[in-house]
Image (cartoon, rainbow, N blue to C red):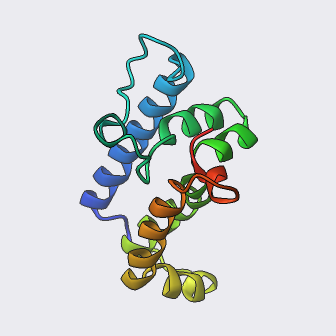
Amino acid sequence: MDRLNPWRFLLLASAAVAAGAGIWLLRTFDPNVAGSPFPPCLFRLLTGHYCIGCGLTRALHALVHGDLPRALSMNPLAVLLLPVLPAMAAWAAGWRPRVLEPVMEVLLRPKLWLWVLPAYWIARNLPWPPFSWLAPG
């Protein structure tokens, strides 16, 4: 195995520090209460519609407190993708185990995300079930 490039190490260390700070903030402050340091969604304030990320802060807050059902009710796509993002970042950084090749081949297709993200964005703004279940709860 190759030695870790100093720039990769710096990137990984920075990501770890940022993740730790984010977890601390989410453990310390509740985004559901008035006076929270977390800003509301600007897109929602301007349009009245949910964006792809609406509910993400509340979902992460629920996750760091161990409440998976609540997290899924806030932003199901983000919660489901959360374990995938570090794998995609590691893949992009050069860590490529063979077992992940078929999965990454699908996940790294831009066309997939050009369909999934807008479809999710539209679906979570439709006012009837099952689409209304995608809106932040």
User: Which residue is found at the position 52% from the left and 85% from the top?
Assistant: 106
Q: Residue 91: x, y in percent?
A: 44, 74
How many marks the image carries: the answer is 0
Residue 27: image location, x then y, percent? 56, 23
Report which quarter residue 78 is drawn in: bottom right
Seen in the picture, residue 91 relative to 21 is either above or below; the reply is: below
Picture quadrant of residue 121 = bottom left
The residue drawn where x is 64% and y is 33% is 62
The x and y percentages for residue 40 are: 38, 29
Residue at 26%, 58% in the rendered image: 6
Q: Is residue 88 left or right of residue 72?
A: left
Front residue of this view, candidates 39 and 19: 39
Q: Can residue 95 be seen in this snapshot?
A: yes
Q: Residue furthest front?
A: 128
Q: Residue furthest top?
A: 35
Give the image location of residue 66, x and y in percent: 72, 34
Q: Quadrant of the C terminus?
A: top right
Note whether residue 1 is visible. Answer: no
